[in-house]
Image (cartoon, grey):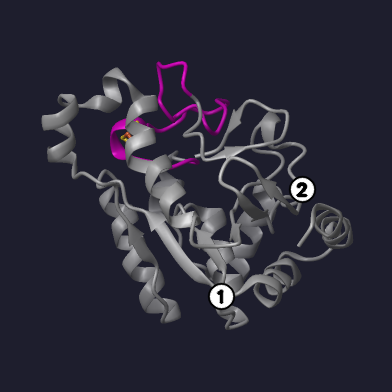
Amino acid sequence: MNSDDLKRHAAELENATAAEIVAWAAKTFAPRLTFATSLGIEDCAIVDLIARQSLPIDIFTLDTGLLFPETYALWRQIQDRYGLTIRAVPPEFTVDEQAVREGPELWARDPDRCCDLRKIQPLRSTLANYDAWITAIRRDQTPDRANAPVAGWDGRFGLIKINPLVRWTSADVQAYVREHRVPYNPLHDRNYPSIGCMPCTSPVLAGEDPRSGRWRGKEKTECGLHIMPGARRAGG
Ligand code: SF4
């Protein structure tokens, strides 16, 4: 698909429902299409949209080896509920191997390098096998995501990126999950609006930015999984 076609499709899909966008993605790109779920509440809604329509979309998650027990339990629960597989994409080295090579608790000393080793590199290797990927980003999550298209070229990873929930608000996500009884991480109900690896995620206080619990006390605010054209880092 050339860039003019992609822009045309993105414009046509701007007012489509999330279910229609996911269905279009499957029809256009499967089996060269994958969904990278972080097992966040938005990602759970997308799995429901995929399963509800029995769409042939590969699904994987970056298993850093440092996820919360609640996240691993949710992973199993989703697979059981929908009868599908969420593939584990691990980093090259286990946490212990990384400690030997880089020193212990790399995330505390150099979280950018830790994210690069445990998330970005495995993601890049996986996405090299596909023409398009689906993500759960929303425009209202960060300033960098405010102009995210429904579908656009992801120059960082060299494939098309499809964002079915870009127009959704947090309230839309909550409403969808409630209406369809979608399983989600119980940590979301314990003041963890954004959940990543255990060492780098803390609960947020009332009035704090929902992402302020990620890499608290550090300048880092993003994994670097999502970068918008002309923008700084966004994502993770
Ligand atoms: Fe490492 Fe933290 Fe990034 Fe996870 S979120 S890969 S522990 S720096």
Q: What's the CA distance linking mark 2 and mark 1? A: 22 Å
Give the left or right position of residue 41, taking residue 228 as reference: left
Give the left or right position of residue 134, taking residue 15 as reference: left
Name the front one of labels 2 and 1: 1
Q: Amino acid at mark 2?
A: Pro
Mark before the other along the chain sequence, 2 or 1: 1
Q: Secondary structure at mark 1?
A: loop
Identify which residue is drawn at 69% across, 59% down: 164
The spot of residue 197 in percent (x, y) is 34, 40
Residue 149 — which label? Answer: 2
| Ligand 1, image quadrant it occupies | top left
Residue closest to the eye, 208 or 215: 215
Hey, which quadrant is residue 86 in on the image? bottom left
Q: Which residue is mark 1?
A: 31
Q: Secondary structure at mark 2?
A: loop
Quadrant containing the N terminus in the rendered view: bottom right
Give the left or right position of residue 207, taking residue 172 as reference: left
The spot of residue 137 in percent (x, y) is 62, 47
The spot of residue 37 in percent (x, y) is 48, 57
Q: Amino acid at mark 1?
A: Pro
- 194 falls in the magenta region: yes
Residue closest to the eye, 48 or 7: 7
**Magenta region:** 193-220
Identify which residue is drawn at 58% across, 40% down: 156
Q: How many marks?
A: 2
